[in-house]
Image (cartoon, rainbow, N blue to C red):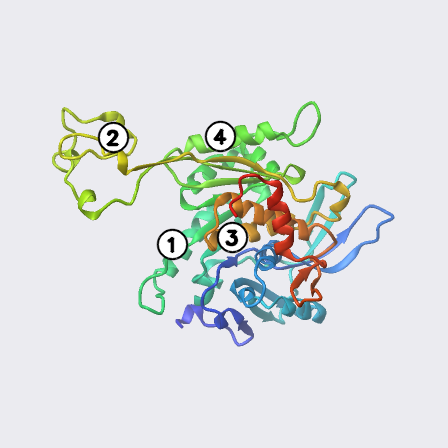
Amino acid sequence: MDGQNQLKPDGEDKALKHQSLDFVTLGMFIIDDIEYLPPTPPVKDILGGAGTYSALGARLFSPPPLSTSVGWIIDQGSDFPPALTELIDTWETSPLIRRTPERLTTRGWNGYDEHQNRAFKYMTPKKRLTAEDLTPSLLASRSFHLICSPSRCRQLVMEIKERRSGLATPDGSGLPKPIFIWEPVPDLCVPDELLNCTNTLPLIDICSPNHNELAGFMGDTGLDPETGEISTAAVERSCEQLLGSMPLQSFALVVRAGEKGCYIARNGGRKRKGGSLEKRKKPSALMHGGLQHDTDMEALFAGLLQDRDGMVVEEEIEVDPGVERWIPAYHIEKEKVVDPTGGGNTFLGGFAVALARGEALETAAAWGSVAASFAIEQVGTPTLGKDEEGKETWNGICVDDRFEEFKARLDTIPA
């Protein structure tokens, strides 16, 4: 382990026990205090922060021993409640725990109005995470959740890639390309940052703002002017504009829209199918001298190559139609939503770990919707337990059972 990656004496890297992480978040750990309108009493010392909830989302779909494939960073200050340490230990994940007695744990205040709009402020200095905070085991993750501004996202992606390039797998080969999931921070989802946003999109795999954040980039409210509700048309229009601005790039937009569910959108395109090596090595007209008088320009701009006789090898082309689809929220009844805090982060944890395990985009969104449903049913995080058969439950429900029930509502989610 090189000098940059060595742990401080007060750090504990539980991820070292599991060399194949599926998910790592660079979201912060925060202890939350939440205040509601009277007569609901406030609650204190609640697990919070984007890092915590996204780790929860990944953990929900990772019963032991898969639980150790979930990595996150916890900075424990001098005021860290022992009860929270005990709670975190029950999850059996792979956190990097850093004890910092010289400072207070990052704490946040949350307040809600009658419309469930949240106000937030830090009560103690925050400790932002960087690529330098990632140990070799965390760096080797199959997916990364980043919550930051566009410019910082670009910096993090480049730094993570650079640091990963120096790592090798046990067989001596390099690490495969990871999945980068970017969650923009609300404060910088403004029209002035739109160009920075589009400059960031080619570097990541998934961009996931919520409906407010997406509307903020586009200079819109994102609301239906007649009903005041979230406008699905505005979400679709904004996604079309963003995808249209980067037609040759490969990324997807996953917009989290509260009770409307989430909208997933990805450009399609054309690519070569896996053909025989002999056919793929045929010289083409473009391999010798560039454009020829008989070059099929339409085929060229579709990303196709011609064979020696100037004919398009149609059978080698696979057309990807892309994706444009709404996935509903799991909870339809408003009374099921007790506290929406962390629902979006939890969605992305479940979504990311699904992609890391090879699931399709639509299936990953369904994982995310189910994960979010567990986060918003109560104040704080859901309760981990076991049923009579010894199967893991959260709030008394098996995650797989809830997913199967949810999948039955959707007609095109693969089995």
In the rendered structure, find residue 177 and report the number of the disc placed on it.
Answer: 1
Placement of the N terminus among the 4 image quadrants: bottom left
Q: Earlier in the sequence, mark 4 or mark 2?
A: 4
Q: Provide the residue designation for mark 3.
A: 354
Identity, as a three-letter code, of the amino acid under mark 1: Lys
Residue 125: quadrant of the picture: bottom right
133 left or right, relative to 396: left
Residue 300 marker: 2
Identify the secondary structure beneath mark 4. helix
Checking the image for residue 116, the label placed there is none
- From the top left corner, tell me how far across and down residue 182 is, in percent: 50, 47
Residue displayed at 18% across by 27% down: 295
For the residue marked with disc 3, what is the amino acid?
Ala
Residue at label 4?
Answer: 240
Q: Mark 1: few, some, or many residues within 10 Å (few <14, many ≥20)? A: few
**Percent x, y of residue 245:** 42, 31
Q: Give the number of the mark in front: 2 or 1.
A: 2
State the residue in front, 174 or 389.
389
Q: Nearer the viewer, mark 3 or mark 4?
A: 3
Spatial separation of the CA atoms under disc 1 and disc 3: 16 Å
Q: In this picture, is 243 found above or below 275? A: above
Q: Is residue 254 shown left or right of residue 290?
A: right
The number of callouts visible is 4
Q: Nearer the viewer, mark 2 or mark 3?
A: 3
Q: Distance between the residues labelled 4 and 2?
A: 25 Å
Q: Which residue lies furthest to the bottom in this view?
A: 9
Q: Is residue 354 above or below residue 210?
A: below
Q: Distance between the residues labelled 2 and 1?
A: 28 Å
In front: label 1 or label 3: 3
